[in-house]
């Protein structure tokens, strides 16, 4: 099991790059057929308002009977230290176990009575608490979210119970080789920096985190200027702003002394870890992902896909992109028999070199179409839209409109792809991580030497 990678700085937006569908020429809503251009033109404007304490309120009103509303916070494992790594993930687990106003049973009953869904997630740079509900219940949803975020009880008994839950999850993740590989890749690509830490943290941290550690984490990071109350669906923006003023105006914007958390710069280190993978990244290069689609799709035009299918060099492979506010990883992950790992790595690196030298107009057109299909796919559902709004406001101070994304995609040329890849990939040190029986994985020096072609 292995993959391949190089690092590129990223300065604008995230795009989900997991779709494997060709460009959608139309979308069906009921009996109507909507063209791609009509879909772009029909996207509602994202409205943005800032409260006096710095908390931002952003929403997109589609007029639907349902909505998703949530709080997005600039807090995640990248803001943690070696000592408290995993605190954000741990806090996510105890957040819904009762507040000072609503014990756990009462909280669950209120959410159930609304027919709503309450959830949360933690990533390396963000934490989100959100609820999908009927639009008419927006006021109650905002009230409950406010209570969960600001008044979590952090009961000692619940903390101990959730400690066991977190430890079990860590054991389960250890059995997921893809997750292990991705964490190892971050650890080697960003070694010595907070971005190299996993979101879940080590088991030692989960065993030793105290209630005071969680309180300190909240006091350090849950500040109004680092929060966005985002909503999508049947949402009136002025109503949402009024609710935010009622429930979040008391969120502090001040830090004690000089305790303002500063996002540490992360350096990329080309290297390997043999737990036994290999990566590239930049949001500008998200297009490149579509040049390496898995052979279980219709995209068999890439040489790598054909080799994987016809010569059975691997069981599966996929391109991926992990984007952060100032950097990212773009790479290929594959699962292969130990006897084929050398050949698969060779052809993977050959594909990277082709991007630097021979990418064609048809390659770029296909990638542009696939990425546009992804953008349209993001219109499907209030929750992904709400998540996109929250992350964009935190990262860029605004929601990047789909029409702007479309223009940026159309502006990409084969020459641009070759130039960018040559700058960040050609003759650069990759980061490599692999798990399993990887005795036949090539030596790192050999992989490094395959990052360029000798030309005569």
Image: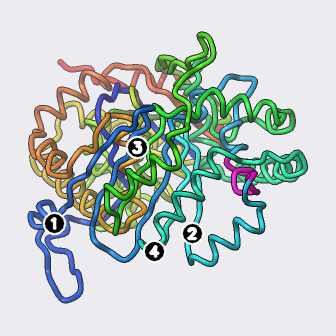
Considering depth in this image, is 395 or 430 the residue closer to the camera?
395
Q: Is residue 150 left or right of residue 304?
A: right
The magenta-colored residue range is 92-100
Determine the secondary structure under disc 2: strand
Q: Which of marks 3 and 2 is in front?
A: 2
Query: Which residue bears the numbered disc 2?
Result: 117
- What is the x, y in percent for residue 206? 80, 39
301 left or right of 352? left
Q: Which residue lies furthest to the top in this view?
A: 258
Of pointers 2 and 4, the one earlier in the residue sequence: 2
Q: What residue is disc 1 on?
A: 39
Circle on res. 304: none
Along the polypeptide, which appears first: circle 3 or circle 4?
4
* Precedes in sequence: disc 1 or disc 3: 1
Q: Where's the C terminus, which quadrant? A: top left
- Of all residues, the one furthest to the bottom in this rendering is 31
Which of the two discs, 3 and 2, labels the residue nearer the N terminus?
Answer: 2
* Residue 279, percent from left and from top: 44, 34
Estimate how packed mark 4 is, as few (under 14), some (14 to 19) or many (20 or more) residues with alpha carbons within 10 Å. some
Kindly report the distance in space between the C-alpha atoms of the residues bearing marks 4 and 1: 24 Å
Tags 3 and 4 in contact by the CB under 8 Å rule? no
Check if mark 2's residue and mark 4's residue have beta carbons within 8 Å.
Answer: no
Return the residue at label 3: 391
Residue 336 can be seen in this image? no
Q: What element carries label 1?
A: helix
Residue 227 x/y as whole percent: 48, 39
Q: Nearer the viewer, residue 382 or 425?
A: 382
Magenta residues, dominant SS class? loop
Spatial CA distance of label 2 from label 4 is 10 Å
Closer to the N terminus: mark 2 or mark 1? 1
């Amino acid at each position: 099991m292995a993959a391949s990678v190089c690092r590129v700085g990223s300065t604008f937006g995230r795009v989900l790059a997991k779709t494997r569908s060709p460009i959608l020429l139309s979308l069906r809503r009921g009996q109507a057929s909507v063209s791609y251009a009509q879909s772009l033109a029909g996207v509602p404007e994202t409205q943005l308002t800032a409260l006096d304490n710095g908390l931002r309120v952003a929403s997109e009103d589609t007029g639907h009977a349902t909505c998703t509303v949530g709080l997005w916070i600039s807090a995640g494992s990248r803001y943690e230290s070696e000592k408290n790594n995993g605190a954000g993930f741990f806090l996510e687990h105890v957040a819904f176990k009762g507040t000072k106003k609503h014990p756990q049973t009462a909280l669950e009953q209120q959410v159930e009575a609304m027919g709503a869904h309450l959830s949360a997630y933690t990533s390396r740079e963000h934490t989100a608490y959100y609820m999908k509900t009927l639009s008419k219940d927006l006021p109650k949803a905002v009230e409950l979210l406010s209570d969960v975020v600001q008044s979590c009880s952090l009961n000692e008994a619940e903390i101990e119970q959730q400690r066991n839950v977190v430890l079990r999850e860590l054991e389960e993740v250890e059995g997921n080789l893809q997750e292990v590989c991705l964490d190892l890749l971050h650890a080697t690509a960003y070694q010595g920096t907070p971005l190299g830490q996993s979101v879940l943290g080590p088991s030692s941290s989960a065993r030793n985190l105290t209630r005071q550690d969680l309180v300190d984490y909240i006091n350090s990071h849950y500040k109004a200027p680092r929060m966005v109350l985002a909503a999508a669906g049947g949402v009136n923006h002025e109503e949402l702003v009024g609710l935010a003023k009622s429930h979040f105006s008391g969120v502090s914007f001040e830090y004690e002394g000089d305790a303002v958390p500063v996002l540490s710069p992360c350096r990329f280190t080309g290297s390997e870890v043999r737990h036994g993978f290999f990566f590239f990244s930049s949001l500008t290069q998200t297009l490149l992902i579509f040049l390496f689609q898995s052979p279980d799709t219709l995209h068999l035009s890439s040489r790598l896909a054909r080799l994987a299918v016809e010569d059975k060099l691997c069981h599966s492979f996929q391109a991926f992109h992990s984007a952060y506010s100032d950097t990212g990883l773009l790479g290929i992950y594959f699962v292969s028999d130990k006897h084929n790992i050398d050949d698969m790595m060779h052809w993977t690196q050959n594909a990277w070199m082709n991007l630097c030298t021979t990418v064609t107009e048809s390659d770029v057109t296909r990638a542009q179409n696939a990425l546009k299909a992804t953008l349209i796919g993001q219109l499907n559902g209030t929750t992904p839209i709400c998540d996109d709004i929250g992350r964009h406001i935190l990262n860029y101070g605004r929601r990047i409109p789909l029409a702007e994304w479309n223009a940026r995609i159309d502006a990409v040329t084969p020459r641009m792809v070759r130039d960018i890849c040559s700058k960040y990939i050609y003759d650069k040190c990759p980061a490599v991580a692999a798990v399993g029986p990887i005795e036949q994985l090539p030596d790192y020096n050999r992989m490094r030497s395959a990052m360029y072609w000798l030309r005569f």
